[in-house]
């Protein structure tokens, strides 16, 4: 029995590493296809890893709030910050309420390297399938087969194929009878239809906007890209958009009616980059002239900039997506233990589940919170 692991963890990403760092038992193995741990952590947040957010609630996630809440309550952002500080890492707040590593993502990876024994890491190893023999899980890899009493699937989603993302977590879940909510790219830019092709000509330009989609609203920076639209506010909108229209307030609350007697040209008065304003004027077939010289119809057309509605053609795909929306159906997972309701001693953590956070550290917080919740359960049994 000595070659049987108490626990096997598939995935050396945020949730898998945090779980391994918090378990009392060290008779574990962490399997990952990459040569180093935390490949996604290393490149996230511009290489500084947006660890968490000052404000974290279930409403910051797309998913079942009743499932999400127990993990967030058990190990919230304050608990995470305290955990990191006791290990020598003091995240710094940037962008008003987002926490990052002070210097680089390497700082949090160093913690995991110190707390997880090297003998517990099996890297450069691709999991091909998982089966069961009695009460043991058999993890079949391209190098060897591993037997374990308990199995945690923390393999993430389909984003970032370049660093080893795969559907293995979903395939394992399906093999054991779990339902998969259709995965799709999220926190990703929008491609545009013919009517908005002029957006592509504005590539590199950014502006502050308010955006509404599926009953949610966000404020922030919109970036025109050669493929369409990107920027933080668009990435957040993409989490909730399925199909149909979204509405953008390009005027960002600016009230034209208060400036009806202004001598300023439209391109000078509106709180937009002139290049953008002039592009809209071309589309609206309007002349750039003083606001006070606009007739009612022209004003009405201009005011549509506060409710600019269009339907994206699609998105930039998994290669550009921060995360994967969808995943293992949380109705089939115990919210207090992260254990499968179908298979004893089988657990699912982090992004592989049908829980997806907004931009701003929420997905890492979910990874850490779900891992901590799971560690408590595994240590208790």
Image: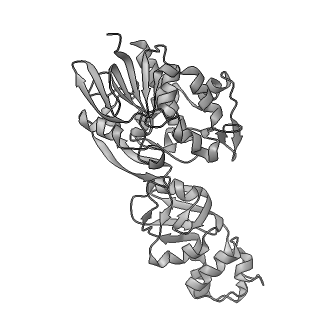
Residue 192 lies, in percent from the top left, at: 47, 70
304 up-or-down from 151: above or below: below
354 up-or-down from 287: above or below: above
Residue at x-position 61% and y-position 80%? 279
Q: Is residue 372 visible?
A: no
Residue 105 lies, in percent from the top left, at: 63, 38
Residue at x-position 30% and y-position 35%? 172
Q: Please give left or right for residue 296 compared with residue 153 in the image.
A: right
Question: In the rendered view of the protein, which quadrant contains the N terminus?
Answer: top left
Question: In the rendered view of the protein, which quadrant contains the C terminus?
Answer: top left
Q: Residue furthest front?
A: 143
Q: Please give left or right for residue 285 compared with residue 264 in the image.
A: left
Q: Nearer the viewer, residue 136 or 95?
A: 136
Residue at x-position 63% and y-position 44%? 47
Q: Nearer the viewer, residue 371 or 158?
A: 158
325 up-or-down from 337: above or below: below
Q: Is residue 80 visible?
A: yes
Q: Quadrant of residue 96?
A: top right
């Amino acid at each position: 029995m000595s070659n049987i692991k108490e626990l096997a963890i598939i995935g050396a990403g945020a949730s898998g590493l945090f779980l391994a760092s918090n378990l009392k038992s060290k008779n574990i193995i962490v399997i990952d296809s990459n040569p180093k741990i935390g490949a996604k952590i290393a490149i996230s947040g511009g290489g500084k890893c947006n660890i968490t957010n000052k404000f974290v609630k279930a409403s910051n996630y797309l998913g079942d709030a009743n499932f999400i809440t127990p993990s967030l309550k058990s190990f919230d952002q304050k608990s995470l910050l305290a955990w990191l500080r006791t290990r020598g890492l003091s995240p710094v707040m940037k962008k008003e309420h987002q926490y990052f590593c002070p210097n680089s993502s390497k700082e949090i990876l160093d913690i995991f390297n110190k707390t997880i024994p090297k003998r517990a890491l099996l890297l450069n190893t691709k999991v091909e399938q998982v089966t069961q023999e009695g009460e043991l899980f058999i993890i079949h890899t391209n190098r060897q087969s591993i037997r374990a009493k308990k199995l945690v699937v923390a393999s993430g989603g389909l984003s970032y194929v370049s660093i080893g993302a795969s559907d293995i977590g979903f395939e394992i879940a399906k093999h054991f009878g779990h339902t998969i909510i259709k995965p799709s790219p999220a926190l990703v830019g929008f491609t545009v239809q013919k009517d908005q092709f002029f957006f592509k000509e504005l590539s590199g330009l950014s502006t502050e906007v308010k955006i509404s989609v599926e009953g949610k609203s966000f404020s922030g920076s919109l970036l025109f890209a050669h493929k369409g639209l990107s920027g933080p506010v668009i990435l957040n909108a993409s989490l909730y958009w399925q199909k149909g229209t979204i509405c953008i307030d390009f005027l960002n609350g600016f009230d034209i009616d208060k400036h009806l007697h202004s001598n300023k040209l439209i391109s000078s008065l509106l709180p937009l980059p002139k290049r953008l304003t002039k592009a809209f004027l071309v589309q609206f077939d309007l002349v750039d002239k003083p606001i006070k010289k606009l007739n009612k119809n022209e004003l009405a057309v201009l005011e549509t900039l506060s409710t600019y509605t269009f339907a994206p053609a699609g998105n930039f795909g998994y290669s550009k997506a921060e995360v994967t929306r969808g995943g293992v159906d949380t109705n089939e997972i115990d919210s207090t233990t992260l254990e499968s309701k179908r298979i004893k001693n089988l657990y699912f953590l982090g992004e592989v589940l049908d829980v997806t956070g907004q931009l701003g550290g929420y997905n890492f917080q979910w990874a850490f919170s779900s891992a901590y919740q799971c560690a408590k359960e595994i240590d208790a049994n």
